Image (cartoon, rainbow, N blue to C red):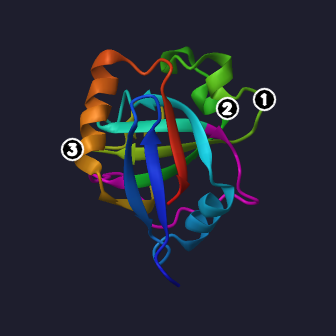
Amino acid sequence: MADRYVTVALDKRGVECTARLLDDKAPLTCAAVWEALPLAGDVYHAKYARNEIYALLPAFAEAEPPLENPTVTPIPGDLCYFTFTDVQLGTASYGYGDAAAHRGRPTVVDLALFYERNNLLLNGDMGWVPGIVWGSVVDGLDRMADACQDLWRAGARGETLSFRRA
């Protein structure tokens, strides 16, 4: 199979990077994401994992992928896939409110980009939170990391994180 690529963008800021899908390491996750593209949602900056931005989306896979190519220590450029229940994300400490937590839907998908080092997927409420590494940024991570830092400092309100076929 030829390499497949996605564009990850912070739309309002006009910044994007390109990632290669890791079809050899996470084939089921890559297939699910690829078939669902384009995907987009409000962007959040992680409270717990440190250098992560993500969007919360309704489940889109025919069946949720298994925990293939898992990590709890993502590196810069990793694209990760997480699955949560509405109850897991529905606590007030997360600050999502009803809309972002997708209340009433059994599954919420978190598509994330890690843009800097020293990440640890350890959540005080849930413990270890392994993610599926399904892509790796191959171009534009430096520009995206700068935009992510701006997002952290200036705020995420009104910004969208999008994923589309490159």
The part of the image, by quadrant, that contains residue 57 is: top right
Relative to residue 145, is residue 78 drawn left or right?
right
Q: Which mark is residue 104?
A: 1
Q: Which residues are magenta?
A: 57-78
Provide residue 46's location: percent of width, then percent of height. Answer: 39, 31
Residue located 49% across and 71% down the image: 4
> Contact (CB < 8 A) between labels 2 and 1?
yes
Q: Would you name the residue on which mark 3 appears?
A: 118
Let me know if residue 113 appears in the view.
yes
Spatial CA distance of label 2 from label 1 is: 7 Å
Q: Is residue 131 left or right of residue 83?
A: left
In the picture as drawn, the residue positioned furthest to the bottom comes out as 1
Dot 2 corresponds to which residue?
Answer: 86
Secondary structure, mark 3, is loop
Three-letter code for the amino acid on which mark 2 is drawn? Asp
Local secondary structure at mark 1: loop
Say whether disc 2 or disc 3 marks the residue closer to the N-terminus: 2
Mainly helix, strand or loop, the magenta region? loop
First along the sequence among labels 1 and 3: 1
> Where does residue 162 sit, x and y in percent of width and height?
52, 42
Kind of residue indicated by mark 1: Gly
Place residue 58 in its image quadrant.
top right
Q: Nearer the viewer, residue 16 or 111?
A: 16
Classify 109 as above or below 25.
Answer: above
Is 138 inside the magenta-drawn segment?
no
Q: Residues within 10 Å of mark 2 (few under 14, many from 20)?
A: some
* The one of 3 and 89 positioned closer to us in this rendering: 3
Disc 2 is placed on an element classified as helix
Give the residue type that dot 3 points to: Asn
Task: Say left or right for 4 vs 146.
Answer: right
Q: Going 40% across and 35% down the picture, which residue do you hit?
A: 14
In x, y percent, where is residue 163?
53, 49
